[in-house]
Image (tube, helix red, strand yellow):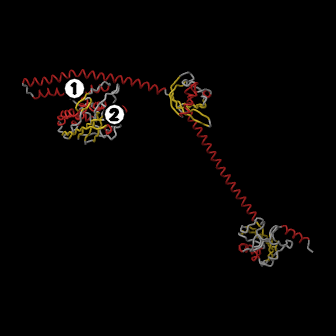
Amino acid sequence: MVSASETRNCALLKAIPDAIFWIHKDGTCLDYQPPKNFTLWASGGNPGQKLQPEGIENLSDRTYIGKKWWEIWPLEVIQQCREFLERAIATLSEQVLEVELSGNDSLCCSQFPPLNSINYHPYSSSIYEIQIIPSSENELLVIVRDLTHLKQTEAQLRHELEQKALQLHHTVLALEAEKAHRQQIEEILAFTQFSLNRAGDSVFWVNSNAQFFYVNEAACLSLGYSREELILMTIHDINLDLPKNVWSDYWDEIKQQGSFTLECYHQTKEGRRFPVESTVNYLEFNGKEYNCILARDITERKQVEAQLLETKTAAEAANRAKSTFLANMSHELRTPLNAIIGYSELLQEDARDIGINDSEFLEDLRSINTAGKHLLALIGDILDYSKIESGKMQLFLESFDLDKAFTQICHTAQPLIEKNANQLVVQFSGELGPMYADLTKMRQILFNLISNAAKFTQKGKIEIAVKKQVRSAIPLVFTPEQESSSNDLFVVFQICDTGIGMSAEQLNHLFQAFMQADASTTREYGGTGLGLAISRLFSQMMGGDILVESELGVGSTFTVYLPMEVKLLQAGGNDWQEPSVPTGAIARKLLREDEVLEQSKP
């Protein structure tokens, strides 16, 4: 009869949910208790085929009893457990290890799935804890506990914890980024507020009811109100030029245009009005409409503009007075100069009549006559320039034969060109026909340019060419009035020399009155610097212009363009303007200028 102790032990073993093996030290399985709630599965066949469970009451499985433990367990477990079993037998101490099996192997037998195998898959891995307890010198108690579900649960919990930690980390990072972004926005907002308050211009935000929504400190200072006072006011209170009855139209116009700038007046708290330049911008913010007005006090600018206008008016009056004075003085000087020239010629005739042969005396008389004519020519240039400057120069248009006029000009200029041992080459077909223009001014233009070429060329060549061209082939920019004119045919005069030429810097002084290339030119060649300025102004008065190309040390080419039929300008159209170097008015590159040379009138 079983003792009470054995009964208790039997009940205790049955309560243990793990598989239990009693193994002799030689490796033989003495007894075996399968795990609780275990089902015996068929080996080598269909994993889903169940066998009848063996009775648990006997606490043994006849299949295992009598076999060696290495015949029962898979090879993978045998390799890991051998050392622990031997150590437990040798030391009689408890040994614990964990093993992991993959596939459809079971630690109990290939027939037995992992413990707690309700959701078992034949190819899932399983983890076991093996506890080896020596019960005597010859026997070992081996308890096999299925940790698969526990490990999976731990792994799942660990994975979920890691995911939660990662999510929490991302959340913390996002919160820190959001905090940094908010701090940056707050700093920008504070800086913007600081900048607006200390801006030199007044800033007003106005809503659709003309009420102030925001004002900066500059606005408060300029108007003498506090911010609390201005916030309760409207734009009509400070801008008397904007009454309430026009506000709706004003608002619609701003909304349509988006932005514009205007000048108006603001009124301070004390009633003082001052001019401002206001830039108005239409804005929408948070679904509401506003006008952002930037106002700048332009009191000083208006004062400067008024002073400049007054100075300009005074300068124009002084300039007209100067031109009138020069014109009057030129007339006053011409009379005695003509007398000096006339008497010098009479003295030369009288000397010849009475037989005076003193060469020095005769040379003095000729010098008086030459100097008088030279001075008369200079006074004539000043008179012409004064008339142009004062707007009183007029054109005297007439019809003349251009071939004959050009031939006379070349014949008259021949001695002047030969004076410096220069060679004259004329390219002229003789088929130019009639021209309607101011013959005197055209002759003066050509003589000035030919005299320039002759003066600045030594033992060289001067070429004079003339031809007709249509307006579309001329490199000039015409005004709309000139474009609509019927003057489609132009005459082109070209004077080329092989003289000293000009540099790029000297181009800046070209066609400027009383200016020459440099001081050395004036000392060496003389002149007042009016010839070219007058010549170009005469050309422009007749609807043409003068262009120039030059290279230092090589020579210069001046080209004159004049309409074949000159039209009188409308009233006020011949007002004088300071001539500029013709760079923007041409369609090709201009290289150099030529020095201005005073000319004797023909």
Disc number at residue 376? 1
Determine the image quadrant of residue 329. Answer: top left
Image quadrant holding the N terminus, namely: bottom right
Residue type at the position of mark 2: Ser
Left or right, residue 8 beside residue 251: right
In this rendering, the answer to whether 457 lies above or below 388 is below
In this rendering, the answer to whether 178 lies above or below 214 is below
Q: Residue at x 89, y 69 (%)?
A: 8
> Which residue occupies the foreground of this view, 201 or 588?
588
Residue type at the position of mark 1: Leu
In the image, farthest residue toward the left: 355
> Which residue occupies the foreground of this view, 411 or 218?
411
Disc number at residue 389? none
Disc number at residue 580? 2
Query: Residue 466: where, in percent of width, then height?
Result: 24, 37
> Which residue occupies the foreground of this view, 344 or 236?
236
* Neighbourhood count class around disc 1 (C-alpha, 10 Å): few under 14, some 14–19, many 20 upward: many
In this rendering, the answer to whether 131 lies above or below 481 is below
Query: Residue 442: where, in percent of width, then height?
Result: 25, 31
Determine the image quadrant of residue 56. Answer: bottom right
